[in-house]
Image (cartoon, rainbow, N blue to C red):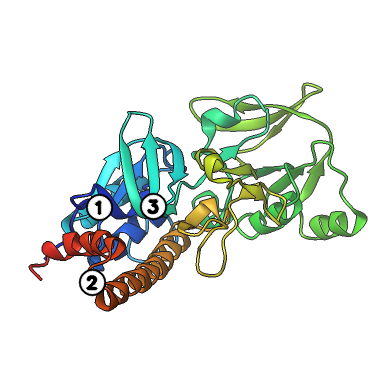
Amino acid sequence: MTARGEDRNGLYDVVVIGGGAAGLNAALMLARARRSVVVLDAGQPRNAPAHAVHGLLGREGMSPAALLERGREEVRSYGGEVVTAEVTDVSAGEDGRFTVSASDGLVHRARRVLVTTGLVDELPDVEGLRERWGRDVVHCPYCHGWEVRDRAIGVLANGPMALHQASLFRQWSDDVVFFTRGTAVPDEQREQLLARGVRLVEGEVEAITVDDDRITGVRMAGGSTVARDVVAVGTRMLARAGFLAGLGLRAREHPSGAGDHLPVDARGQTDVPGVWAAGNVTDPSAQVGGAAAAGAFTAAQINGDLVQEDTRIAVAAYRDPFSADAESQVAELVAGDARHGL
């Protein structure tokens, strides 16, 4: 047997907003739990520019596009739905159900909403950075360090994690230059970098120089160029959560200072009952494996929450089978049970 689609009242158990690793793994878990689930995905994955996914056991080196396509196939194999749609608004009704509206005019109703929309990387205004992003402009040593090992790496200061980033990339290369870009480097941290052989270059960075489709250096505002093969830069990571404003949910500054996120409790629930979140939208540091794991965990919490609601409805109907509320609520459960032949 497979999971059903929306019931005869046009109601899904869960609408998942975002079809990356977190969203698809959550949908897979929910579909296997025989929940009706639809994934609404705008088709703008954060890691699209990257050639491969790394650090993911069993899928090392797989292209991001291939990984997502396999995930979509797995969700559909259990009866889950995956739809290309950009969500523009989520609203809550007096009945505790949610209406999810998309830019193409589609509207879906749901008992629960799971937000897995990830984040957007905001790069500093340096000529050439965006064009090389995900290729030889990188940000995470655990994602890209092996691929750029032993090369001449330049780390651009950008945000509170810059010094930490420079220290980390030194693990993969003994030729690392830290471009301060006007950042004040405390004496202790300066000594630590110098002791490990990291050279500091003061002044503003003007552009990334490229020749024959590869980075050749970092050009300073004064006109000089420091030869480099790879540029590492931390981004400001912004949660994709603007469509939740109608619910009173907004992204907040992340404790790291490296961007914002959508806060959740230990189970993955937001401040609005019935709305959950997982993956990079709530944890900017999560790699693909971590995001997928968070999606699976949160899906289990959502299913447990729905089981409790199903039980409350069943008990109310059992005690008073002729009440109008009981008839209406039981109709939702019966619609779901029908596809099991129960």
The quadrant where residue 282 appears: bottom right
Q: Quadrant of residue 44?
A: top left
Rendered location of residue 299, percent (x, y) = 38, 65
Circle 3 or circle 2, nearest the eye: 2
Is residue 138 toward the left or the right of residue 93 in the image?
Answer: right
Judged left or right of residue 139, residue 155 is right
Does residue 274 sit above or below 65 in this rendering?
below
Task: Name the residue furthest top.
Answer: 223
- Compared across the picture, whether 281 is left or right of 331 comes to right
N-terminal label among 1 and 2:
1
Q: Position of residue 129 (x, y in %)?
A: 60, 31
**Residue 138 in picture, x, y percent from top left:** 56, 44
> Which residue sits at x=80%, y=30%?
204
Q: Which residue is mark 1?
A: 70
* Amino acid found under the numbered disc labelled 1: Arg
Asked whether 319 or 221 is in front, the reply is 319
Please provide percent x and percent y for residue 89.
45, 37
Residue at disc 3, secondary structure: loop
Residue matched to label 3:
97
Q: Is residue 129 visible?
A: yes
* Residue 321 numbered mark, or none: 2
